[in-house]
Image (cartoon, rainbow, N blue to C red):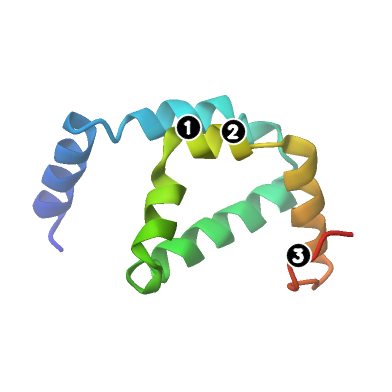
């Protein structure tokens, strides 16, 4: 994708309400996480985007749904999940 095509796509995304995700991301205050935690979050975000086309449509919609994302956000639970991933626990099972 060319720079111009990418820029136009981002502008269209903003015009269609996608910019709401930026304000949602700000409400999560990611900058308050430790640097190592932010690296894991960045890795997971990049992984989700890399696998985006393979995800079921329902999963993609849930990821992009502002209300679902906001309702599911729990800083302490997220930090615990990040810690488990950092320790190599990829099972997804609660401790």
- Which of label 3 and label 1 is nearer to you? 1
Quadrant of the rendering where the N terminus is positioned: bottom left
Answer with mark 3 or mark 1, whichever residue precedes in sequence.
1
Q: How many marks?
A: 3
Read off the residue under disc 1: 67
User: 42 left or right of 23?
Assistant: right
Query: Disc 1 and disc 2: Cα gap in Å?
Result: 6 Å
The disc placed on residue 83 is none
Which of the two residues, 60 or 9, is positioned nearer the viewer here? 60
Read off the residue under disc 3: 85
Name the quadrant containing residue 83: bottom right
Answer with mark 3 or mark 2, whichever residue precedes in sequence.
2
Which of the two residues, 38 or 45, is positioned nearer the viewer here? 45
Query: Disc 3 and disc 1: Cα gap in Å?
Result: 25 Å
Query: Residue 61 placed where, x, y %?
Result: 37, 50
Callout 3 environment at 10 Å: few (<14), some (14 to 19), or many (20+)? some
Report if the CB atoms under discs 1 and 2 are less than 8 Å apart: yes
Query: Disc 3 and disc 2: Cα gap in Å?
Result: 22 Å
Callout 1 secondary element: helix
Callout 2 secondary element: helix
């Amino acid at each position: 994708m060319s720079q111009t095509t990418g820029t136009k796509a981002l502008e269209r995304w903003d015009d269609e309400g996608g910019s709401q995700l930026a304000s949602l991301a700000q409400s999560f205050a990611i900058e308050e996480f430790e640097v190592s935690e932010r690296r894991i979050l960045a890795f997971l975000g990049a992984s989700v985007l890399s696998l985006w086309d393979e995800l079921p449509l329902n999963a993609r919609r849930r990821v992009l749904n502002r209300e679902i994302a906001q309702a599911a956000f729990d800083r302490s639970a997220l930090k615990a999940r990040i810690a488990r991933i950092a320790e190599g626990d990829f099972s997804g099972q609660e401790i």
